[in-house]
Image: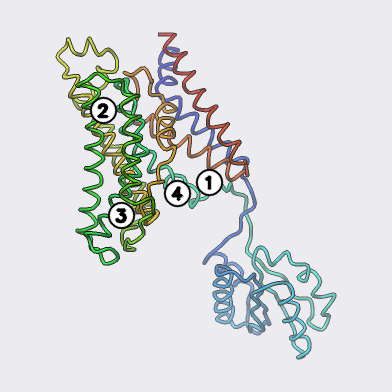
Protein backbone atom coordinates (compact mmCIF):
# COMPACT_ATOMS: atom_id res chain seq x y z
CA UNK A 1 0.00 0.00 0.00
CA UNK A 2 2.80 2.37 0.93
CA UNK A 3 4.85 1.79 -2.23
CA UNK A 4 2.00 2.52 -4.72
CA UNK A 5 1.13 5.68 -2.77
CA UNK A 6 4.71 6.90 -2.85
CA UNK A 7 4.89 6.11 -6.58
CA UNK A 8 1.67 8.05 -7.17
CA UNK A 9 2.99 11.06 -5.28
CA UNK A 10 6.32 10.85 -7.11
CA UNK A 11 4.78 10.66 -10.56
CA UNK A 12 1.77 12.94 -10.15
CA UNK A 13 2.44 14.89 -6.97
CA UNK A 14 2.42 18.22 -8.82
CA UNK A 15 -1.20 17.65 -9.83
CA UNK A 16 -2.09 17.67 -6.12
CA UNK A 17 0.01 20.82 -5.70
CA UNK A 18 -1.92 22.47 -8.55
CA UNK A 19 -5.23 21.43 -6.97
CA UNK A 20 -4.11 22.81 -3.61
CA UNK A 21 -3.10 26.13 -5.19
CA UNK A 22 -6.47 26.39 -6.94
CA UNK A 23 -8.25 25.68 -3.66
CA UNK A 24 -6.16 28.28 -1.81
CA UNK A 25 -6.70 31.07 -4.34
CA UNK A 26 -10.39 30.17 -4.56
CA UNK A 27 -10.66 30.66 -0.80
CA UNK A 28 -8.78 33.97 -0.64
CA UNK A 29 -10.67 35.47 -3.61
CA UNK A 30 -14.14 34.49 -2.36
CA UNK A 31 -16.32 37.60 -2.72
CA UNK A 32 -19.89 38.68 -3.34
CA UNK A 33 -20.76 38.43 -7.03
CA UNK A 34 -23.69 40.00 -8.83
CA UNK A 35 -25.98 38.26 -11.26
CA UNK A 36 -25.27 39.79 -14.69
CA UNK A 37 -26.53 39.70 -18.25
CA UNK A 38 -29.93 38.35 -19.19
CA UNK A 39 -30.37 36.65 -15.82
CA UNK A 40 -30.03 40.01 -14.03
CA UNK A 41 -32.51 41.67 -16.38
CA UNK A 42 -35.07 38.90 -15.90
CA UNK A 43 -34.61 39.00 -12.14
CA UNK A 44 -35.22 42.74 -11.63
CA UNK A 45 -37.97 42.81 -14.25
CA UNK A 46 -40.02 40.32 -12.21
CA UNK A 47 -41.01 43.08 -9.77
CA UNK A 48 -42.59 45.21 -12.50
CA UNK A 49 -46.35 45.11 -12.86
CA UNK A 50 -49.10 46.94 -14.70
CA UNK A 51 -49.24 50.67 -13.93
CA UNK A 52 -46.09 50.96 -11.81
CA UNK A 53 -43.84 54.01 -12.12
CA UNK A 54 -40.20 52.95 -12.39
CA UNK A 55 -36.88 54.82 -12.59
CA UNK A 56 -33.70 53.07 -13.74
CA UNK A 57 -30.31 54.36 -12.50
CA UNK A 58 -26.88 52.97 -13.42
CA UNK A 59 -23.32 54.17 -13.88
CA UNK A 60 -22.18 55.56 -17.22
CA UNK A 61 -20.43 52.47 -18.58
CA UNK A 62 -21.13 50.52 -21.76
CA UNK A 63 -22.04 47.34 -19.85
CA UNK A 64 -24.39 49.06 -17.39
CA UNK A 65 -25.94 51.20 -20.12
CA UNK A 66 -26.82 48.04 -22.05
CA UNK A 67 -28.25 46.57 -18.83
CA UNK A 68 -30.38 49.69 -18.30
CA UNK A 69 -31.77 49.59 -21.84
CA UNK A 70 -32.62 45.89 -21.53
CA UNK A 71 -34.34 46.46 -18.18
CA UNK A 72 -36.33 49.39 -19.58
CA UNK A 73 -37.59 47.21 -22.42
CA UNK A 74 -38.46 44.36 -20.05
CA UNK A 75 -40.42 46.42 -17.50
CA UNK A 76 -42.25 48.30 -20.26
CA UNK A 77 -43.29 44.96 -21.71
CA UNK A 78 -44.59 44.00 -18.25
CA UNK A 79 -46.86 47.05 -18.26
CA UNK A 80 -44.85 49.40 -16.04
CA UNK A 81 -43.96 52.96 -17.04
CA UNK A 82 -40.30 53.99 -17.12
CA UNK A 83 -40.20 57.54 -15.73
CA UNK A 84 -36.49 58.06 -16.46
CA UNK A 85 -33.32 56.16 -17.31
CA UNK A 86 -30.29 57.67 -15.57
CA UNK A 87 -26.83 56.75 -16.85
CA UNK A 88 -24.25 58.66 -14.87
CA UNK A 89 -23.53 59.79 -11.32
CA UNK A 90 -25.53 60.31 -8.11
CA UNK A 91 -25.87 63.97 -9.08
CA UNK A 92 -27.54 62.94 -12.35
CA UNK A 93 -29.99 60.76 -10.45
CA UNK A 94 -30.79 63.53 -7.96
CA UNK A 95 -31.56 65.84 -10.88
CA UNK A 96 -33.90 63.23 -12.38
CA UNK A 97 -35.66 62.79 -9.01
CA UNK A 98 -36.12 66.57 -8.68
CA UNK A 99 -37.57 66.75 -12.17
CA UNK A 100 -39.99 63.89 -11.47
CA UNK A 101 -41.10 65.43 -8.16
CA UNK A 102 -41.57 68.86 -9.75
CA UNK A 103 -43.87 67.36 -12.38
CA UNK A 104 -46.05 65.81 -9.71
CA UNK A 105 -45.07 62.26 -10.54
CA UNK A 106 -44.58 59.35 -8.19
CA UNK A 107 -42.21 56.38 -8.01
CA UNK A 108 -42.99 52.81 -7.07
CA UNK A 109 -39.50 51.43 -7.65
CA UNK A 110 -35.96 52.38 -8.59
CA UNK A 111 -34.01 49.70 -10.46
CA UNK A 112 -30.26 50.01 -9.94
CA UNK A 113 -27.05 48.21 -10.73
CA UNK A 114 -24.72 46.67 -8.16
CA UNK A 115 -22.73 49.90 -7.71
CA UNK A 116 -25.50 52.47 -8.14
CA UNK A 117 -27.62 50.69 -5.51
CA UNK A 118 -25.06 51.88 -2.93
CA UNK A 119 -25.39 55.56 -3.82
CA UNK A 120 -26.40 57.66 -0.80
CA UNK A 121 -29.17 59.30 -2.79
CA UNK A 122 -30.89 55.89 -3.03
CA UNK A 123 -31.30 55.66 0.74
CA UNK A 124 -32.61 59.22 1.03
CA UNK A 125 -35.30 59.27 -1.68
CA UNK A 126 -38.23 59.09 0.74
CA UNK A 127 -36.62 61.69 3.03
CA UNK A 128 -35.54 64.20 0.37
CA UNK A 129 -38.45 63.68 -2.04
CA UNK A 130 -41.52 62.76 0.05
CA UNK A 131 -43.83 63.65 -2.84
CA UNK A 132 -42.50 60.64 -4.77
CA UNK A 133 -43.70 58.18 -2.12
CA UNK A 134 -41.58 55.32 -0.79
CA UNK A 135 -40.09 53.63 -3.82
CA UNK A 136 -38.40 50.26 -3.44
CA UNK A 137 -34.77 50.02 -4.58
CA UNK A 138 -34.30 46.88 -6.66
CA UNK A 139 -30.96 45.41 -7.77
CA UNK A 140 -29.76 41.99 -8.99
CA UNK A 141 -29.15 39.45 -6.25
CA UNK A 142 -25.60 38.67 -5.19
CA UNK A 143 -23.98 35.35 -4.37
CA UNK A 144 -20.64 34.19 -2.97
CA UNK A 145 -18.15 32.93 -5.53
CA UNK A 146 -14.34 33.11 -5.92
CA UNK A 147 -13.01 35.58 -8.49
CA UNK A 148 -10.38 32.95 -9.25
CA UNK A 149 -13.00 30.42 -10.39
CA UNK A 150 -14.82 32.74 -12.75
CA UNK A 151 -14.99 31.19 -16.21
CA UNK A 152 -13.37 34.24 -17.81
CA UNK A 153 -10.47 34.11 -15.36
CA UNK A 154 -9.86 30.37 -15.89
CA UNK A 155 -9.86 30.81 -19.67
CA UNK A 156 -7.52 33.77 -19.24
CA UNK A 157 -5.09 31.60 -17.26
CA UNK A 158 -5.09 28.94 -19.97
CA UNK A 159 -4.74 31.49 -22.78
CA UNK A 160 -1.88 33.33 -21.09
CA UNK A 161 0.11 30.16 -20.47
CA UNK A 162 -0.53 28.67 -23.94
CA UNK A 163 2.64 30.02 -25.58
CA UNK A 164 4.93 29.01 -22.72
CA UNK A 165 3.28 25.59 -22.52
CA UNK A 166 3.68 24.97 -26.26
CA UNK A 167 7.38 25.80 -26.13
CA UNK A 168 7.75 23.67 -22.99
CA UNK A 169 6.88 20.54 -25.00
CA UNK A 170 10.13 20.82 -26.94
CA UNK A 171 12.06 21.87 -23.84
CA UNK A 172 10.84 18.76 -22.02
CA UNK A 173 12.25 16.55 -24.77
CA UNK A 174 15.56 18.41 -24.63
CA UNK A 175 15.87 18.26 -20.84
CA UNK A 176 14.91 14.58 -20.79
CA UNK A 177 18.02 14.01 -22.93
CA UNK A 178 20.02 15.87 -20.22
CA UNK A 179 20.32 18.95 -22.42
CA UNK A 180 19.10 22.54 -22.28
CA UNK A 181 17.88 25.07 -24.85
CA UNK A 182 18.36 28.72 -23.92
CA UNK A 183 17.47 30.00 -27.38
CA UNK A 184 13.71 29.46 -27.30
CA UNK A 185 12.84 33.00 -26.19
CA UNK A 186 14.86 34.56 -29.01
CA UNK A 187 13.47 32.05 -31.50
CA UNK A 188 9.98 33.10 -30.43
CA UNK A 189 10.85 36.73 -31.21
CA UNK A 190 12.43 35.78 -34.54
CA UNK A 191 9.36 33.78 -35.52
CA UNK A 192 6.99 36.63 -34.63
CA UNK A 193 9.06 39.05 -36.70
CA UNK A 194 9.36 36.65 -39.64
CA UNK A 195 5.65 35.85 -39.85
CA UNK A 196 4.72 39.53 -39.57
CA UNK A 197 7.28 40.64 -42.16
CA UNK A 198 6.26 37.89 -44.59
CA UNK A 199 2.61 38.89 -44.32
CA UNK A 200 3.47 42.55 -44.81
CA UNK A 201 5.97 42.18 -47.64
CA UNK A 202 4.80 39.13 -49.59
CA UNK A 203 1.27 38.10 -48.58
CA UNK A 204 -0.55 41.38 -49.12
CA UNK A 205 -0.22 43.09 -45.72
CA UNK A 206 -3.70 44.16 -44.54
CA UNK A 207 -5.25 42.44 -47.57
CA UNK A 208 -3.49 39.10 -46.95
CA UNK A 209 -5.59 35.99 -47.51
CA UNK A 210 -5.62 32.70 -45.57
CA UNK A 211 -3.17 31.01 -47.96
CA UNK A 212 -0.57 33.76 -47.60
CA UNK A 213 -0.86 33.81 -43.82
CA UNK A 214 -0.55 30.03 -43.56
CA UNK A 215 2.55 30.12 -45.78
CA UNK A 216 4.02 32.88 -43.58
CA UNK A 217 3.46 30.71 -40.49
CA UNK A 218 5.14 27.73 -42.15
CA UNK A 219 8.16 29.86 -43.14
CA UNK A 220 8.56 31.18 -39.58
CA UNK A 221 8.26 27.76 -37.94
CA UNK A 222 10.61 26.18 -40.49
CA UNK A 223 13.24 28.89 -39.98
CA UNK A 224 13.19 28.33 -36.23
CA UNK A 225 13.33 24.57 -36.83
CA UNK A 226 16.50 25.08 -38.88
CA UNK A 227 17.99 27.13 -36.04
CA UNK A 228 17.14 24.35 -33.58
CA UNK A 229 18.59 21.77 -35.97
CA UNK A 230 21.81 23.81 -36.23
CA UNK A 231 22.09 23.80 -32.42
CA UNK A 232 21.63 20.03 -32.47
CA UNK A 233 24.33 19.69 -35.14
CA UNK A 234 26.84 21.71 -33.13
CA UNK A 235 26.10 19.62 -30.05
CA UNK A 236 26.27 16.20 -31.74
CA UNK A 237 28.97 16.80 -34.35
CA UNK A 238 31.43 18.88 -32.34
CA UNK A 239 30.44 17.79 -28.82
CA UNK A 240 29.95 21.38 -27.63
CA UNK A 241 27.96 21.64 -24.37
CA UNK A 242 24.28 22.45 -25.03
CA UNK A 243 24.42 25.39 -22.64
CA UNK A 244 27.11 27.12 -24.73
CA UNK A 245 25.57 26.32 -28.11
CA UNK A 246 22.08 27.47 -27.22
CA UNK A 247 23.39 30.54 -25.42
CA UNK A 248 25.18 31.52 -28.64
CA UNK A 249 22.05 30.81 -30.69
CA UNK A 250 20.02 32.93 -28.28
CA UNK A 251 22.23 35.92 -29.10
CA UNK A 252 22.42 35.17 -32.83
CA UNK A 253 18.68 34.74 -33.36
CA UNK A 254 17.87 37.77 -31.22
CA UNK A 255 20.28 39.79 -33.37
CA UNK A 256 18.57 38.52 -36.54
CA UNK A 257 15.16 39.50 -35.16
CA UNK A 258 16.34 43.06 -34.46
CA UNK A 259 18.11 43.29 -37.82
CA UNK A 260 15.16 42.08 -39.88
CA UNK A 261 12.70 44.37 -38.11
CA UNK A 262 15.18 47.26 -37.83
CA UNK A 263 14.40 47.32 -34.14
CA UNK A 264 10.74 48.19 -34.77
CA UNK A 265 7.46 46.36 -34.32
CA UNK A 266 5.67 45.17 -37.45
CA UNK A 267 1.95 45.96 -37.38
CA UNK A 268 0.64 45.64 -40.95
CA UNK A 269 -1.31 42.44 -40.28
CA UNK A 270 -4.96 41.78 -41.20
CA UNK A 271 -7.57 41.40 -38.47
CA UNK A 272 -8.24 37.82 -39.53
CA UNK A 273 -4.73 36.80 -38.42
CA UNK A 274 -5.79 37.00 -34.76
CA UNK A 275 -8.00 33.92 -35.24
CA UNK A 276 -5.27 31.61 -33.94
CA UNK A 277 -4.33 33.67 -30.89
CA UNK A 278 -7.63 35.26 -29.89
CA UNK A 279 -10.36 33.30 -31.65
CA UNK A 280 -12.57 30.76 -29.90
CA UNK A 281 -14.54 28.32 -32.06
CA UNK A 282 -15.21 25.36 -29.72
CA UNK A 283 -17.15 25.88 -26.45
CA UNK A 284 -15.71 29.42 -26.22
CA UNK A 285 -12.27 27.90 -25.51
CA UNK A 286 -9.50 30.02 -27.14
CA UNK A 287 -8.01 28.45 -30.26
CA UNK A 288 -4.52 28.84 -28.77
CA UNK A 289 -5.60 26.68 -25.83
CA UNK A 290 -7.12 24.07 -28.14
CA UNK A 291 -3.84 24.00 -30.11
CA UNK A 292 -1.88 23.62 -26.87
CA UNK A 293 -4.03 20.71 -25.69
CA UNK A 294 -3.80 18.98 -29.09
CA UNK A 295 -0.01 19.29 -29.10
CA UNK A 296 0.25 17.88 -25.58
CA UNK A 297 -1.95 14.93 -26.51
CA UNK A 298 0.29 14.22 -29.52
CA UNK A 299 3.48 14.68 -27.48
CA UNK A 300 2.19 12.34 -24.77
CA UNK A 301 1.61 9.66 -27.40
CA UNK A 302 5.10 10.22 -28.82
CA UNK A 303 6.77 9.94 -25.42
CA UNK A 304 4.80 6.94 -24.16
CA UNK A 305 3.88 4.90 -27.23
CA UNK A 306 6.54 5.52 -29.89
CA UNK A 307 10.13 4.36 -30.27
CA UNK A 308 11.54 7.89 -30.45
CA UNK A 309 10.06 8.60 -27.01
CA UNK A 310 11.79 5.58 -25.51
CA UNK A 311 15.02 6.66 -27.20
CA UNK A 312 14.79 10.14 -25.65
CA UNK A 313 14.50 8.63 -22.17
CA UNK A 314 17.32 6.16 -22.87
CA UNK A 315 19.71 8.89 -24.05
CA UNK A 316 18.97 11.02 -21.00
CA UNK A 317 19.21 8.12 -18.57
CA UNK A 318 22.59 6.83 -19.74
CA UNK A 319 23.96 8.01 -23.07
CA UNK A 320 26.78 5.47 -23.22
CA UNK A 321 24.48 2.55 -22.44
CA UNK A 322 21.97 3.79 -25.01
CA UNK A 323 24.70 3.94 -27.66
CA UNK A 324 25.86 0.42 -26.86
CA UNK A 325 22.24 -0.77 -27.06
CA UNK A 326 21.99 0.51 -30.63
CA UNK A 327 20.12 3.76 -29.99
CA UNK A 328 21.07 6.39 -32.64
CA UNK A 329 22.06 8.92 -29.99
CA UNK A 330 23.06 11.74 -32.35
CA UNK A 331 19.86 11.51 -34.38
CA UNK A 332 17.78 11.45 -31.21
CA UNK A 333 19.50 14.61 -29.96
CA UNK A 334 19.04 16.27 -33.35
CA UNK A 335 15.33 15.41 -33.19
CA UNK A 336 14.97 16.94 -29.71
CA UNK A 337 16.59 20.27 -30.64
CA UNK A 338 14.81 20.41 -34.00
CA UNK A 339 11.41 19.96 -32.32
CA UNK A 340 12.34 22.49 -29.65
CA UNK A 341 13.17 25.07 -32.32
CA UNK A 342 9.99 24.40 -34.31
CA UNK A 343 7.76 24.66 -31.24
CA UNK A 344 9.47 27.90 -30.23
CA UNK A 345 8.67 29.13 -33.73
CA UNK A 346 5.06 28.04 -33.36
CA UNK A 347 4.93 29.88 -30.03
CA UNK A 348 6.12 33.01 -31.83
CA UNK A 349 3.35 32.64 -34.43
CA UNK A 350 0.73 32.31 -31.69
CA UNK A 351 2.08 35.36 -29.87
CA UNK A 352 2.13 37.40 -33.07
CA UNK A 353 -1.49 36.38 -33.59
CA UNK A 354 -2.43 37.29 -30.02
CA UNK A 355 -0.79 40.71 -30.22
CA UNK A 356 -1.44 41.26 -33.96
CA UNK A 357 2.16 42.29 -34.48
CA UNK A 358 5.73 41.06 -34.48
CA UNK A 359 8.51 42.54 -32.39
CA UNK A 360 12.10 41.57 -31.57
CA UNK A 361 11.34 42.29 -27.92
CA UNK A 362 8.89 39.39 -27.63
CA UNK A 363 9.97 36.37 -25.63
CA UNK A 364 12.10 38.18 -23.07
CA UNK A 365 12.86 35.80 -20.16
CA UNK A 366 10.60 33.17 -21.75
CA UNK A 367 13.38 30.59 -21.80
CA UNK A 368 13.50 30.81 -18.00
CA UNK A 369 9.73 30.51 -17.62
CA UNK A 370 9.71 27.53 -19.99
CA UNK A 371 12.52 25.78 -18.11
CA UNK A 372 10.71 26.56 -14.86
CA UNK A 373 7.50 24.96 -16.14
CA UNK A 374 9.40 21.83 -17.16
CA UNK A 375 11.32 21.55 -13.88
CA UNK A 376 8.31 22.33 -11.67
CA UNK A 377 6.45 19.64 -13.63
CA UNK A 378 8.91 17.02 -12.41
CA UNK A 379 11.34 16.65 -15.32
CA UNK A 380 14.81 15.97 -13.97
CA UNK A 381 17.61 18.32 -15.07
CA UNK A 382 19.87 15.28 -14.98
CA UNK A 383 17.84 13.71 -17.78
CA UNK A 384 15.98 10.46 -18.21
CA UNK A 385 12.86 11.41 -16.24
CA UNK A 386 9.85 13.56 -17.03
CA UNK A 387 6.46 13.58 -18.70
CA UNK A 388 4.26 15.82 -20.80
CA UNK A 389 1.47 15.65 -18.23
CA UNK A 390 3.94 16.88 -15.63
CA UNK A 391 5.13 19.74 -17.84
CA UNK A 392 1.58 20.89 -18.56
CA UNK A 393 0.87 20.74 -14.83
CA UNK A 394 4.03 22.74 -14.12
CA UNK A 395 3.03 25.40 -16.65
CA UNK A 396 -0.38 25.74 -15.02
CA UNK A 397 1.17 25.89 -11.55
CA UNK A 398 3.22 28.91 -12.62
CA UNK A 399 0.22 30.50 -14.34
CA UNK A 400 -2.04 29.92 -11.32
CA UNK A 401 0.51 31.39 -8.92
CA UNK A 402 0.91 34.50 -11.09
CA UNK A 403 -2.81 34.92 -11.63
CA UNK A 404 -3.64 34.33 -7.97
CA UNK A 405 -1.07 36.88 -6.84
CA UNK A 406 -2.46 39.40 -9.33
CA UNK A 407 -6.00 38.85 -8.01
CA UNK A 408 -4.80 39.34 -4.43
CA UNK A 409 -2.83 42.50 -5.38
CA UNK A 410 0.63 41.11 -4.66
CA UNK A 411 3.20 43.47 -6.17
CA UNK A 412 5.25 42.31 -9.15
CA UNK A 413 8.56 42.31 -7.25
CA UNK A 414 7.19 39.95 -4.64
CA UNK A 415 5.80 37.71 -7.39
CA UNK A 416 9.32 37.20 -8.72
CA UNK A 417 10.52 36.18 -5.26
CA UNK A 418 7.69 33.65 -4.94
CA UNK A 419 8.26 32.17 -8.40
CA UNK A 420 11.98 31.89 -7.74
CA UNK A 421 11.26 30.06 -4.48
CA UNK A 422 8.87 27.69 -6.29
CA UNK A 423 11.52 26.84 -8.90
CA UNK A 424 14.19 26.32 -6.25
CA UNK A 425 11.82 24.13 -4.28
CA UNK A 426 11.05 22.01 -7.35
CA UNK A 427 14.76 21.45 -8.05
CA UNK A 428 15.37 20.63 -4.39
CA UNK A 429 12.60 18.02 -4.45
CA UNK A 430 14.09 16.52 -7.62
CA UNK A 431 17.53 16.34 -5.98
CA UNK A 432 16.15 14.69 -2.86
CA UNK A 433 14.25 12.18 -5.02
CA UNK A 434 17.49 11.27 -6.86
CA UNK A 435 19.38 10.82 -3.59
CA UNK A 436 16.74 8.35 -2.38
CA UNK A 437 17.10 6.18 -5.48
Residue 99 sits in quarter? bottom right
Q: Which residue is mark 3?
A: 196
Q: Return the disc, 3 or 4, that comes first in the chain's sequence.
A: 4
Crowding near pointer 3: few (<14 within 10 Å), some, many (20+)?
many
Q: CA distance from mark 2 to mark 4?
A: 27 Å
Colouring mode (rainbow / by chain / secondary structure / one colour): rainbow
**Which is in the foreground here, disc 3 or disc 4?**
3
> Of the numbered discs in the image, which one, if any, rests on residue 149?
1
Q: Which residue is mark 4?
A: 155
Q: CA distance from mark 1 to mark 3?
A: 35 Å
User: Disc 3 versus disc 4: distance between alpha carbons?
Assistant: 26 Å
Decide which of tag 2 and tag 4 comes sooner along the chain: 4
Quadrant of the image containing the N terminus: top left
CA gap between label 2 and label 1 equals 32 Å
Please state if 255 lies on the left or on the right of 118 as rendered: left
The disc, 1 or 3, on the residue closer to the chain's N-terminal end is 1
Image depth: mark 2 or mark 1 in front: 2
Instruction: Find disc 2 in the rendering and name its residue.
Output: 303
Distance between the alpha carbons at the discs numbered 4 and 1: 10 Å
Amino acid sequence: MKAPLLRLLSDHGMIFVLAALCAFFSFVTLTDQSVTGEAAVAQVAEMASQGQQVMIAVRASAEESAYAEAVAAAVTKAGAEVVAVVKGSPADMRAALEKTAASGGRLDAVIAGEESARWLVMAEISKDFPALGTPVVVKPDSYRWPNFLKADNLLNIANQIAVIAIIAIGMTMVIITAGIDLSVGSLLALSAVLVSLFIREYAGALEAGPGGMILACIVAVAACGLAGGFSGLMITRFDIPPFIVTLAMMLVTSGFAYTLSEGQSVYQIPDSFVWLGRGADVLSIPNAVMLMLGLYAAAHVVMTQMRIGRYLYAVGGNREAAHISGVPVKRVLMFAYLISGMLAGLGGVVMASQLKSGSPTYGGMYELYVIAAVVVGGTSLSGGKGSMVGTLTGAFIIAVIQNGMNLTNVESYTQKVVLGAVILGAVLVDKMRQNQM
